[in-house]
């Protein structure tokens, strides 16, 4: 008799682990020692064909440690180099600044008069920080011959600008290095 293949996907966040079992079943547990033990217990009950999870800046480390210790060895992928991690961190900060700037501009439209000056001041500061962050991103790309070349190639595509190229370079460092195999 053929055993049903079980595939497991784990979404790792700071607070919890959302585990989906295919063909069926879902469970959410805290992302702590007890939660990792619960996940391991569930995995042992239905030995999976494959377990996948995304590297999420270190939040996955306790779980992968538990899985590795239990000889459920997740496929290891190399961490991005220090330069790429720094680029990704600056890019994440840029995203945060854009979100804050959007929120403050939205508040300004309906803000009472006594609050508007504070909002305008904060908006101006956020815009300066955003320009400074964009400058840091551009500098990082200019300083790397590999990134410079990839940036030029990506930007040669109509509609692709600095934010998209930086996002691709930071989040897909393997870009341009994979084969069709």
Image: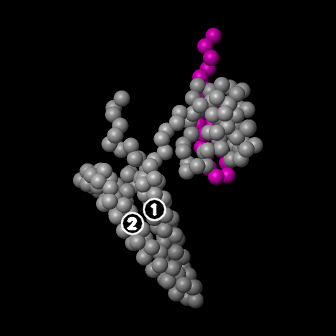
SS under mark 1: helix
Q: Estimate the x, y position of residue 64 in percent, counting from the top left.
A: 62, 39
Check residue 17 for magenta coloring: yes
SS under mark 2: helix
Q: Estimate the x, y position of residue 46 in percent, counting from the top left.
A: 68, 26
Which is nearer the eye, 61 or 125? Answer: 61
Residue wearing tag 1: 90
Residue 132 in view = yes
Q: Estimate the x, y position of residue 62 in percent, counting from the top left.
A: 65, 44
Which residue is painted at 32% across and 42% down in the image? Answer: 176
| Structural crowding at the residue carrying mark 1, measured as other residues with C-alpha within 10 Å and reported as few (<14), some (14–19) or many (≥20) | some
The residues bearing labels 1 and 2 have C-alpha atoms spaced at a distance of: 8 Å
Left or right, 35 with respect to 113, comes to right
Q: Is residue 88 above or below residue 136?
A: above
Residue sitting at the far bottom: 114
Which is nearer the eye, 63 or 51? Answer: 63
Q: Is residue 54 above or below residue 148?
A: above
| Structural crowding at the residue carrying mark 2, measured as other residues with C-alpha within 10 Å and reported as few (<14), some (14–19) or many (≥20) | some
Which residue is painted at 69% across and 43% down in the image? Answer: 28
Residue 151 in view = no
Which is nearer the eye, 23 or 109? Answer: 23
Check residue 87 for magenta coloring: no
Q: Which quadrant would residue 127 be assigned to in this image?
A: bottom left
Question: Of the numbered discs in the image, which one, if any, rests on residue 136?
Answer: 2
Is there CB contact under 8 Å for labels 1 and 2? yes
Q: Which residues are magenta?
A: 1-21
Which residue is painted at 57% across and 33% down in the image? Answer: 74
Q: How many marks?
A: 2
Which residue is painted at 45% across and 53% down in the image? Answer: 82
């Amino acid at each position: 008799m053929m055993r049903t293949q079980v595939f497991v996907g784990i979404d790792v966040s700071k607070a919890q682990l959302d585990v989906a079992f295919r063909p069926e079943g879902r469970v959410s547990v805290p992302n702590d020692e007890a939660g990792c033990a619960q996940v391991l217990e569930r995995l042992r009950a239905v030995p999976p064909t494959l377990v996948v999870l995304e590297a999420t800046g270190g939040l996955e480390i306790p779980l992968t440690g538990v899985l590795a210790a239990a000889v459920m060895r997740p496929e290891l992928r190399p961490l991005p180099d220090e330069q790429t991690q720094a680029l990704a961190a600056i890019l994440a900060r840029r995203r945060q600044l854009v979100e804050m700037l959007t929120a403050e501009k939205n508040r300004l439209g309906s803000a009472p008069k006594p609050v508007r000056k504070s909002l305008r001041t904060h908006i101006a500061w956020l815009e300066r920080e955003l320009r400074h962050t964009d400058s840091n991103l551009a500098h990082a790309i200019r300083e790397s011959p590999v990134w410079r070349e990839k940036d030029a190639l990506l930007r040669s595509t109509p509609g692709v600008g600095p934010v998209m190229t930086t996002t691709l370079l930071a989040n897909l460092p393997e870009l341009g290095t994979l084969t069709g195999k």
